[in-house]
Image (cartoon, helix red, strand yellow):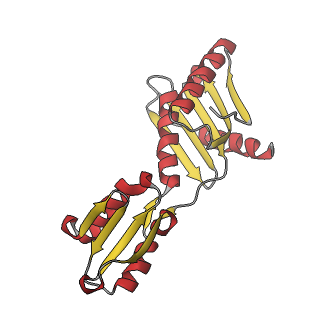
Amino acid sequence: MEALETFVVESAVPAEAAAYRSIVADVISELMLGGAIGRIKIILRPEDSLFQMAILLRGSQPPVRLADFAGLGYGVMERKEVKISIREEKYLPKLLEKLWARYGRGQVLQPERNTLIVRQDQDPEKEIESLGSMLIADPKESLQSRLIEMAIRSTPEGFRVRYHAMKENSFIFVASEDTLKPEWIQQAHQMLAELQEEQ
């Protein structure tokens, strides 16, 4: 796991804080979030049935478009084909799903491992431009779901009432066995503000 700039776990019982720090570190490692998280602070108050987490993220990755990992050109002009030459295979499954949804499976051919041919009725030049800007993956969506999973897996058993919020470079999470109090959510936002002030 990449070293975090700040990793604080507070609890009234020091041994409990150390145990939770270890649990959270393991979950961060398992979900490969070490590179995304810069600072994290957790407050655990079992006496109030409260778990609060504030995370400051490192710089986020931009969305991935087809032109970012593939070359686009003409196939056989008479058939109005577009040829896609893949440079990074890791996006191929998502690309195929999107192409099948847009054109149908019968119109998307794969003559070679890193080559796709799309048969379509439109002007190939316009279609190349449209395909080049097609959104294939948004790392921010994936990151948010992994952060939520990390927070849920780190939460004490039975804390099923939850709140989370994610902005550009931050994430907060509050959980309890009881109804969440507005001040608990406000405290989590304050924890985040304190992490931001450390810069």
- In front here: 145 or 108? 108
The residue lying at 63 percent from left, 48 percent from top is 170
Q: Position of residue 166 (x, y in %)?
A: 56, 50
Residue furthest to the left: 106
Count every numbered label the image shows and give the total.
0
- Residue 179 in view: no
Residue furthest to the top: 15
Quarter assignment of residue 51:
top right
The residue lying at 61 percent from left, 35 percent from top is 53
The residue lying at 57 percent from left, 28 percent from top is 50
- Residue 62 in view: yes
The residue lying at 65 percent from left, 19 percent from top is 17
Quarter assignment of residue 37:
top right
Quarter assignment of residue 54:
top right
Q: Position of residue 7 (x, y in %)?
A: 70, 31
Q: Position of residue 35 (x, y in %)?
A: 62, 41
- In front here: 23 or 16? 23
Task: Determine whether 48 is above or below 81 in the image.
Answer: above
Q: Position of residue 137 (x, y in %)?
A: 45, 58
Position of residue 56 in the picture relative to residue 96 (left or right): right
Quadrant that contains the N terminus: top right
Task: Determine whether 120 is above or below 54 in the image.
Answer: below
